[in-house]
Image (cartoon, rainbow, N blue to C red):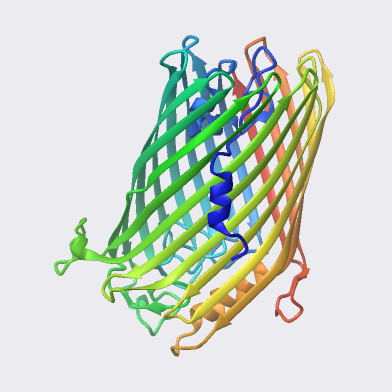
Amino acid sequence: MLIKRGCIIFLLAFWANLSWAQLKDSIDLSQNTYHKNNLQNLLEQPLLYSKYRFKNFTQSSVAFVQEKRQLKRVQTPSKNTEWSFNTRGLYAINSRLRLYGKFLFTKSFEKDLGYTLGLERSTNRPVLDPHYFFAPKKADWESQFYQIAGGASYLLSKNWSFALNVAYENQQAYRLQDPRPEITAAFYKANAHLGYTQGKHKIAAQAGIGRRTENHQSLYVDDALNSPAYPDTFTQFTSGYGLVTFNDSYFKHLRREIPKTWGFAYQYSATNWVLSGAYTYHTGVSKLYAADANNQIYYDENLVSHAYRKEKQELRIQTDYEGNKLDASWGLHYKHTQGDNYIEQAGGQNFRLTEEQIGLNLKLLREEQKRILWQTQANMNLFVGEYIDLLGYTHKEIQTLVTEIEIGRTLYQKNNHNLFVALQSLYSHALQQKLDWQQVTENTTFIDDVVFPDHAYEGTNRLLTGLTAAYTRSIDNERSLRLRLQYALETALHPADEYLNFDANNKINSFVGFCITLSY
């Protein structure tokens, strides 16, 4: 692979997550898009922020997002319409205790989705996790998603601090045409953090555990369609990336995973700048439980048919400067993921996933009397992926460089009215792609209809341009109303490899979003 993991982990193990210097009296997380990710960072590394003077706020929003995709991977819907309600907030009880959290509800309507009967989509990932059921025929889906996450941080003494974060997620999804799976998924997790501060230095450690479960049940209105005579609607099973078999547990099965997390962080604070970071390790095994001889499903290790072990390591470095008028932030992010799929009945491994990502980001913010004169950010991300199916005889390698630039400024501000506009450009460049495949069965439908088209997509350069406009009306010193509109287009430029059989003409993706937000 491109990166020698052991050396990087040894050298960078003390670095990573976002923070910033505390020069100003307080930071309003509800009003400034420059700090839009800091509440999520607070949920991930709360002790790096335990002494920071955040302004108390509650923010509720209703949003509409619609995506139309002609340029896409196969296991991605051609259209997705999403409505969501989101509430988040932060409140300092006193100088030692702070509470924070969020609630999210999303309702989604997907159109023309084929080759997967599970919850995962290939919208933002080259290959789905292995062992899932599929049918080639495209159909519409409906789903709803709930998320509740929150926590508290507490200063135990001058030097010691503690935080506890908890989260719960629930998702329900069903397909509207044969085959008709109904899926219910739940996820619980808790993370405990302990920190020690000495002068300008702070160290923190964390440990967490969770539980993810999925209940799959499928039916046919017309049972005759579940037959090899009707290949478009016949339910098949893939275990890897190319190995396709029949699995009689399609009508009902369970999944369960117990993810675990541990990590540590370090922070150095100066007068008006901060250097901080963290290393985090995630591991878990996703197991598929088949039905027993009596067609009953329950969690029993004797019923495990497939197991997918996944490990993820993350490193972040962040340096942040806060001046009287100019704020700046620079960061480095590295992530390594490895997944190994095992077929329990065969007692061996058949699939391996290896992904590495390196990202650089830079943000600048120019303010004057709480007015954003302008802000800009630039991101560069290198993605390297390798996927090997030993039994399907498929070997895929990709390298992609994504560069993003966003520039925004306040066009109008008078009395209680503010209009902010930002332009965005994102360019995805295919550096390298390689696909080796050998035919081992007569049925090559998955290879022909999924593997080959997705390989052509990975090898195509793409350009996205977008516009964001936000109007904010200040009601009083504590409350404000914001209307936000986003529009973007993505086009295919040309295949990076001239031998790829891919027509980039008239391949356009469009994205429209509208959001109403009340801060109070």
The picture places residue 467, in percent across and down from the top left corner, at 77, 42
Foreground residue, 133 or 203?
203
Q: Is residue 33 left or right of residue 293?
A: right
Judge whether 140 appears above or below 204 on screen.
below
Question: Measuring 71% from the left and 55% from the top, which residue is drawn there?
Answer: 402
Judge whether 228 appears above or below 377 on screen.
below
Displayed quadrant of residue 518:
top right
The picture places residue 258, in percent across and down from the top left corner, at 32, 49
Of the 4 image quadrants, the one containing the N terminus is bottom right
Displayed quadrant of residue 492:
bottom right
The picture places residue 267, in percent across and down from the top left corner, at 57, 29
Of the 4 image quadrants, the one containing the C terminus is top right
Question: Measuring 42% from the left and 35% from the top, which residue is drawn there?
Answer: 206
Judge whether 1 appears above or below 92 on screen.
below
Foreground residue, 65 or 491?
491
Question: Measuring 57% from the left and 54% from the top, which residue is drawn there?
Answer: 7
Q: Is residue 231 left or right of residue 294?
A: right
Judge whether 375 appears above or below 314 on screen.
above
Foreground residue, 198 or 375?
198
